[in-house]
Amino acid sequence: MIKKGNILIVIMIMALNASVFGQVAVRSFSLDEVIDLAQQQSPDALLAKNRFLKAFWEMRTSEARLLPQLALDATVPNYNRSIIKVTQPDGSDAFREISQMTTSAALGISKNVGFTGGNIFMQSRLQRIDYLATDSSAWASDPLVIGYQQNIFTFNPYKWSKRIDPIKYREAKRQYLEDVQQIAITATNYFFNLLVSQVRQKIEEQKEANYDTLYKIGIGRFNLGKIAENDLLQLELSYLQAQAAVESNQTETENRMFQLKSYLRLQDDTPLELVLPVEEIAFFDVAVQQATLLAQTNSSQALAFDRRLMEADREVNRAQTTDRFSAALFAQYGLTQSAENFDDAFRSPQDQQVVTLGLSIPIVDWGLAKGRIKIAESDREIVRTSIEQERIDFEQNVYLQVQNFMMQQRQLALAAKADTVARKSFDIAKQRYLIDKIDIINLRDAQSSNDNATISFIRSLQDYWLNYYQLRKLTLFDFKENQEISIDFEKLR
C-alpha cells in the first residue's frame, strides 16, 4: 500500500477539492462509484448489454432450428368463379364455367436433422370442395402422412451452425466482460480528467490568493525602498496571470464535469466532487507467464481465432459442395381417402407412397466449381496466416501490458515521493521569501515545481488505474483479488 507519509498529499488535495465549491451542495463520488454507475447506465453499458442480448437470441434461434416445429396451414376459403379450358374425353378442349369454393387445413410437425441436413415431417390434411352450381361437395383426407427429404452431397448449414454458434455465444460472453472493463477504462479517464481540473482550479485559486498577498507585501516593501520596481512589477504580473488562470481553468473544469455527467447520464445540475482513489491502491506482482496463460484461456480474442478458422473451413466445404454432383431424396408414406361427405372421407383409407430421387450432374462448367474451391482455400490460408501473426501480437501485447503495470507501480511511488518533496520545498521557499532571503523568481520556480508535482502525481495515479483495468480486460482476471472476473448472465436477459 502507499506509505502513510504520502497520505498527507491526499488529505491536502481533498481539502483543496472540498473548498472549491464553498457552501454549494455537491455530490461526492469515488472512482469505484463512478465506474459502478458507468457500468450500469452509461451509453457504452447499454450498447454492450444489447450486443450480448443479440448474441444470446442468435444462439437461441440457432438451437430452435433443430427443434420440432408445429404448424397449421389453412385456406378458409378459396372462392373461384371463372371460365377455364377443360380437356374432353375425346381429347378436344372446351371452355367451361366453374363456380366452386375450396377449404383446406393441414396440421404438421417437422424437424431438421442437424447431422444429415435433412428434414423429417408428419402431417394430417383435410380438404373440401363446394360446387356451387350443383350445390354438392367433396371431401379428401390424408389422416397421416410421414415423409423425409434429404439433399445428398450438398452443403449442410446445420452441421456447421452446431459447431460454430456455441463458440460465438461463448465469445459474446467474454466480449461483454471485456466491454465492462473497457467501460471502467473510459470512466477512469473521465474521472481523472475532471479531478485534475478541479485540483488545478484550486491550485490556481490558491496562487491567486498567494500572489495577491505577496503583491500587497511588495507594495509596502517598495514604498520602504527594500525592493526594486522591477520586482514589484513581477509580483503584479504574477498576480494578473493567476487571475487569468483561474478563469481559464474554470471553463475547463465545467466542460470536463459535463463530459463525465453526460457519460454517467446524470441529469441534475449538482456539481460533482471527486475523491482521490489512493486508499484502494495495492502494489502486487504479476507473472507474465500466468497473465499470458489467463489471456489465452479467458480472452474473447482466443475464441475468435478458433471461430474464424472454423468459418474458413466452412466456406471451403460450401465451395466443394456447390455446383458439384448432388442428389435430392424425397420419400413419403401416408393414408388417403376421398368421399362426398365428411364421415366417409375417413373410412377405409388407402395407402400412398411417394419416392423421388433427383440427380444434378454438371458436365461442363469451364472450371467454375474448381475456381470457387481454390478461392475458398486461398482465403482459408490467408485467415490462418493472419491468425498466426495475431496470436504473436496478442501475446506480445499481454507481455507489454504486464511490464507497463509493474513499471507504473514504481512510477506511482516515485510520483508520490516527488510530490511530498516539492510541497516541502515550496513551503520553505515561501517562508524564505517572506523573510527576504530569496527573490520572486526563486519563489515562482518553487511554486511551479510544486504545482507540477501535484498534477504529475494525479496523472501517475490515473495511469496506474488505467493499466490495472487494461490488464483485467486482457486476462479477465482480477490479480488484486486473485479471482476470475465473472457475472450472472441470467440477469442480463
Image: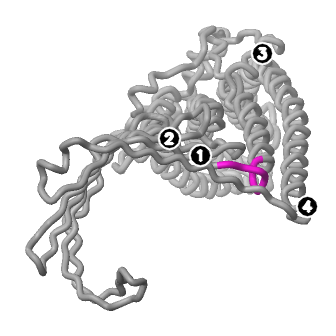
Disc on the earlier residue, 3 or 1: 3
Instruction: Describe the element under mark 2 as helix, strand or loop.
Output: strand
Q: Nearer the viewer, mark 3 or mark 1?
A: 1
- Labelled disc at residue 2: none
The amino acid pointed to by label 3 is Leu
Mark 1 residue element: strand
Residue 111 quadrant: top left
Q: Earlier in the sequence, mark 1 or mark 2?
A: 2
Residue position marked by numbered label 3 in the rendering = 293
Frontmost residue, 132 versus 53: 132
Is-magenta flag for residue 152?
no
Q: Is there CB contact under 8 Å for labels 4 and 1? A: no
Q: SS class of the residue under badge 4?
A: loop
Give, as a three-letter code, the residue at label 4.
Gly
Could you give the CA–CA distance between mark 4 and mark 1, rounded to whole angstroms? 27 Å
Task: Give the residue number, with chain letter if any, for mark 4.
Answer: 367
Q: Residues under labels 3 and 1: Cα distance?
A: 49 Å
Q: Is residue 360 visible?
A: yes
The percent coordinates of residue 355 (x first, y second) are 53, 46
